[in-house]
């Protein structure tokens, strides 16, 4: 009888410990899109961007925010007409991930691309004025 009680208590204790690790974790709040973002792009759901064309204002400090609305990994590259990648590649690994970076974007037309293999359909136009 005492063995059952110890076993049941141990299982209950382990379950409580495991569930405690599943909390919302106030230590690490979810990242939010900055209010001063000059361009916001969402990946997904699925292998697509949320729009086929985006616009942004030209500048040397254009803040770009990239958020994942899909369960799979996506990247975002800004590519100029001469196929030069502008600035840093943004990468988001899972749904809810957000990455933000600042770019020098002169006026012109660019292509937004996800370079994950098999994601060739993830292309959009970026017009910077």
Image: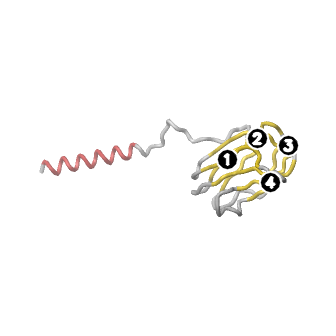
Colour pattern: secondary structure
Q: Where is residue 122 in the image (x, y as percent from the top left)?
A: 71, 60
Q: Position of residue 91 (x, y in %)?
A: 64, 49
Marks 3 and 2 sit apart, C-alpha to C-alpha, by 10 Å
- Image quadrant for the C terminus? top right
Q: What residue did someone put label 2 on?
A: 103
124 to 39, vertically: above or below: below
Q: Which of marks 4 and 3 precedes in the sequence?
A: 4
Q: Is residue 51 left or right of residue 20?
A: right
Q: What residue did someone put label 1 on?
A: 90
Q: Is residue 58 left or right of residue 115?
A: right
Of residue 10 and residue 85, the one placed in the foreground of this image is 85
Label 1 sits on a secondary structure element that is strand
Q: Where is residue 71 in the image (x, y as percent from the top left)?
A: 57, 57
Q: What residue did someone put label 3 on?
A: 106
Label 3 sits on a secondary structure element that is loop
Q: Which residue lies furthest to the left in this view?
A: 1
Circle 4 residues within 10 Å: few <14, some 14–19, many ≥20? few
Please name the residue shown 69% across and 47% down the image: 89
Please name the residue shown 74% across and 57% down the image: 51
Quarter of the image where one finds residue 58: top right
Marks 1 and 2 sit apart, C-alpha to C-alpha, by 11 Å
Q: In this view, does 3 lie to the left or right of 20?
A: left
52 to 20, vertically: above or below: below
Label 2 sits on a secondary structure element that is strand
Of residue 81 and residue 105, the one placed in the foreground of this image is 81
Q: In this view, does 54 lie to the left or right of 28?
A: right
Label 4 sits on a secondary structure element that is loop
The circle on residue 83 is 4
Marks 4 and 1 sit apart, C-alpha to C-alpha, by 17 Å
Q: Which of marks 3 and 1 precedes in the sequence?
A: 1
Q: Which of marks 2 and 1 precedes in the sequence?
A: 1
């Amino acid at each position: 009888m005492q063995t059952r009680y110890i076993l049941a208590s141990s299982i209950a204790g382990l379950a409580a410990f495991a569930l405690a690790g599943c909390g919302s974790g106030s230590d690490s709040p979810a990242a939010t899109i900055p209010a001063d973002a000059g361009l916001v792009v969402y990946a997904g759901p699925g292998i697509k961007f949320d729009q086929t064309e985006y616009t942004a204002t030209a500048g040397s400090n254009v803040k770009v925010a990239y958020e994942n609305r899909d369960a799979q990994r996506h990247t975002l590259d800004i590519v100029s007409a001469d196929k030069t990648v502008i600035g840093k590649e943004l990468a988001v690994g899972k749904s809810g991930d957000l990455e933000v970076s600042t770019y020098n974007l002169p006026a012109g037309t660019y292509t937004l691309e996800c370079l994950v293999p098999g994601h060739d359909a993830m292309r959009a136009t970026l017009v910077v004025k």
